[in-house]
Image (cartoon, rainbow, N blue to C red):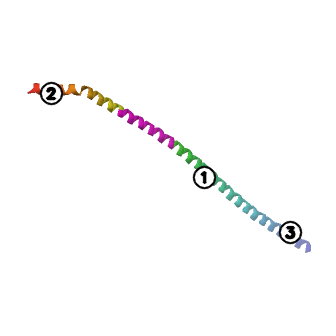
Amino acid sequence: MDELDFVFKKIIEIDNKATEVKENTNLVIAEKELLLNQEIQTLDDKLIGNSKAELDNRLSIAIDECEKKAELIVEEANNYCKNIQQKYKEIKDELKEIFVNEILEAQ
């Protein structure tokens, strides 16, 4: 019977050890999974930060380009207006004469 008790004790020991190893393995897996998820989150945050910085940079460049184009458009419009005003000044007296003559002729 001692031999049988010895075998049963060894089987129970092996079973307990297997249960302990399984629990330890599950703990290690859970810890590794947690660390991996944290690392993934860190990488995601870094990638998002880099992407946001890149988008902010591109947005800033696009805004600068639009502001320069707007300034050119305003400058062209001002030049166009000055040109029209200059041409009007050049022909203003002549136009007055034409209008006066036409009014006088119409009467």
Instruction: Answer with left or right where residue 19 lies relative to residue 46.
Output: right
Determine which residue is flagged by label 2: 100
Image location of residue 104, percent across then percent down: 11, 26
> Would residue 43 be counted in the magenta stretch?
no
- Magenta part of the protein: which range? 59-78
The answer to whether 88 is drawn above or below residue 7 in the figure is above
Q: Are marks 2 and 1 in contact (CB under 8 Å)?
A: no
Task: Give residue 103's quadrant in the image.
Answer: top left
Task: Give residue 20's quadrant in the image.
Answer: bottom right
Q: Quadrant of the N terminus?
A: bottom right
Instruction: Look at 23% across and 28% down and name the residue there.
Output: 92
Report the label total: 3
Q: Earlier in the sequence, mark 1 or mark 3?
A: 3
Q: Are marks 2 and 3 in contact (CB under 8 Å)?
A: no
Determine which residue is flagged by label 3: 10
Instruction: Answer with left or right where residue 18 lies relative to residue 79.
Output: right
The amino acid at mark 3 is Lys
Q: Earlier in the sequence, mark 2 or mark 3?
A: 3
Image location of residue 27, percent across then percent down: 72, 63
Q: CA distance from mark 2 to mark 1?
A: 78 Å
**Prevailing SS of the magenta stretch:** helix
Q: Are marks 1 and 3 in contact (CB under 8 Å)?
A: no
Quick one: label 1, few (<14), some, or many (20+) residues within 10 Å? few
Q: Tell me the tag on residue 45.
A: 1
Q: Nearer the viewer, mark 2 or mark 3?
A: 2
Quick one: label 3, few (<14), some, or many (20+) residues within 10 Å? few
The answer to whether 54 is drawn above or below residue 97 in the figure is below
Q: CA distance from mark 1 to mark 3?
A: 51 Å
Secondary structure under the numbered disc 3 in the rendered image: helix
